[in-house]
Image (cartoon, rainbow, N blue to C red):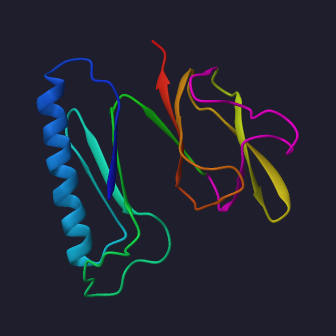
Amino acid sequence: MARARRAERSSGDAASGDERALELTRRLAALLAELGLSEVEVESADVRVRVQRGSGAPAPLPAPVVADERPLVADVVSPALITMEAPMVGTFYRASSPTTDPYVQEGDVVKEGQVLCIIEAMKLMNEIESKVAGRVARVLVENGHAVEYGQPLFLIDPQP
């Protein structure tokens, strides 16, 4: 089962855009299974689609499609959104301690340099700051999960 997320578009026919994104997602999911890839991403002028397996190691080649295969996740986001990526490998934390509120929630307005989260690496707590001012459109990682270098953590809609 594929799950698609779409950010609002500033122009164009949303219905035909949705159909185009859905068709592209289906094609990418088929390509993913056919080639045994764990992730594939395509970007055009107005849309970016990323399809990846739920988690775990990539499927062995050849990768037959079976009913119990992990679900696919597809992201369709506006290219105007800024992706905050993990600058290191570690454990992602949304708050400074388990009993405090998260640094940011989806919909919060943030300033450039504001702390968004913490990544624990080798017993050191590293505060991750926003590189732009804007509104947090999406939190992409769950609290306490491991993150890889370059993994998207947040999507931020920059303010003009």
Q: Residue at x 22, y 52 (%)?
A: 25
To which quarter of the image does residue 70 belong? Answer: bottom left
To which quarter of the image does residue 95 belong? Answer: top right
Magenta range is: 87-110
To which quarter of the image does residue 112 belong? Answer: top right
Q: Is residue 116 above or below residue 144?
A: above
Q: Is residue 99 magenta?
A: yes
Q: Residue at x 58, y 62 (%)?
A: 148
Q: Quadrant of the C terminus?
A: top left
Q: Position of residue 44 (x, y in %)?
A: 20, 41
Q: Position of residue 101 (x, y in %)?
A: 80, 32
Main secondary structure found in the magenta portion = loop
Q: Is residue 154 above or below residue 38?
A: above
The reply, left or right, for residue 108 in relation to residue 76 is right
Q: Quadrant of the N terminus?
A: bottom left
Q: Position of residue 15 (x, y in %)?
A: 15, 28
Q: Is residue 126 magenta?
A: no
The answer to which of 157 and 18 lies nearer the viewer is 18
Q: Is residue 154 above or below residue 66?
A: above
